[in-house]
Image (cartoon, rainbow, N blue to C red):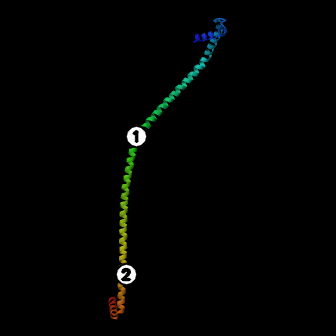
């Protein structure tokens, strides 16, 4: 590297460019100055540059470690999601089966409740009909009895001899 720098200085020097007057030894002093400058810069900047690169290397190392941890986390999450996705068709099938079973149970319960309610309504209707029938029969009996009593009164009041017999029987029955 130093040789390359030296040759570049030699061949690009002003002395050569100005027509070849001068010798390569004219470049010896500037080459020494350049070497001293480069050596001084290396000596002074070696520590800070070395520290800079060490800190950058440490940052890169930490970043890579964090990236590796994140990659493991992402891989774990990916596997979990993949397992969930693999189980999804089975979960859908199970959910469908559960919903079909629930619908069947609901239908059965609804039919049972409907039948029970229908039987209750039938029983209630029969009871109401029987009560209404009994009430109507009682009213008819009362009407019939009132009619018989009214006709009997009418007949007794129209026939004097019958009225006397009734009075006589009532008086004997009271004693």
From the top left corner, tell me how far across and down residue 19 is, in percent.
66, 7
Q: Residues within 10 Å of mark 2 (few under 14, many from 20)?
A: few
Is residue 16 found left or right of 103 in the rendered image? right
Q: Which residue position holds label 2?
A: 143
Q: Residue furthest front?
A: 19
Badge number at residue 131: none
Badge number at residue 87: 1
The residue mark sitting in front, 1 or 2, is 1
From the top left corner, tell me how far across and down residue 106 is, in percent.
38, 54
For the C terminus, the image quarter is bottom left
| Closer-to-camera residue (34/145) | 34
Label 1 residue SS: helix
Is residue 10 found left or right of 121 in the rendered image? right
From the top left corner, tell me how far across and down residue 46 is, in percent.
59, 17
From the top left corner, tell me how far across and down residue 111 is, in percent.
36, 58
Whether tag 1 and tag 2 are in contact, CB under 8 A, the answer is: no
Q: Is residue 27 above or below residue 152?
A: above
Is residue 21 found left or right of 137 in the rendered image? right
What is the distance, in whole Å, between disc 1 and disc 2 at their CAs? 82 Å
Residue 118: quarter of image: bottom left
In the image, what residue occupies the spot 59% across and 20% down?
49
Residue 108: quarter of image: bottom left
| Closer-to-camera residue (166/74) | 74
For the N terminus, the image quarter is top right
In the image, what residue occupies the spot 47% across and 33% down?
74
Q: Is residue 158 above or below residue 100?
A: below
In the image, what residue occupies the spot 37% across and 73% down?
132
Q: Earlier in the sequence, mark 1 or mark 2?
A: 1
Label 2 residue SS: helix
Q: Residues within 10 Å of mark 1 (few under 14, many from 20)?
A: few
């Amino acid at each position: 590297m130093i040789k390359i720098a030296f040759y570049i200085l030699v061949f690009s020097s002003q002395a050569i460019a100005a027509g070849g007057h001068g010798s390569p030894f004219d470049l010896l002093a500037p080459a020494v100055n350049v070497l001293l400058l480069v050596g001084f810069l290396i000596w002074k900047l070696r520590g800070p540059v070395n520290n800079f690169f060490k800190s950058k290397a440490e940052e890169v190392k930490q970043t890579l470690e964090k990236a590796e941890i994140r990659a493991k986390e992402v891989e774990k999450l990916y596997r979990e999601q993949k397992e969930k996705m693999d189980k999804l068709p089975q979960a859908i099938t199970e959910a469908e089966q559960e919903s079909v079973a629930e619908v069947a149970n609901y239908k059965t319960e609804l039919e049972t409740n409907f039948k029970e309610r229908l039987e209750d309504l039938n029983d209630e209707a029969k009871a109401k009909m029987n009560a209404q029938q009994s009430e109507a029969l009682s009213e008819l009996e009362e009407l019939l009895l009132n009619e018989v009593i009214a006709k009997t009164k009418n007949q007794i009041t129209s026939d004097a001899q019958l009225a006397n017999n009734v009075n006589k029987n009532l008086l004997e029955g009271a004693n």
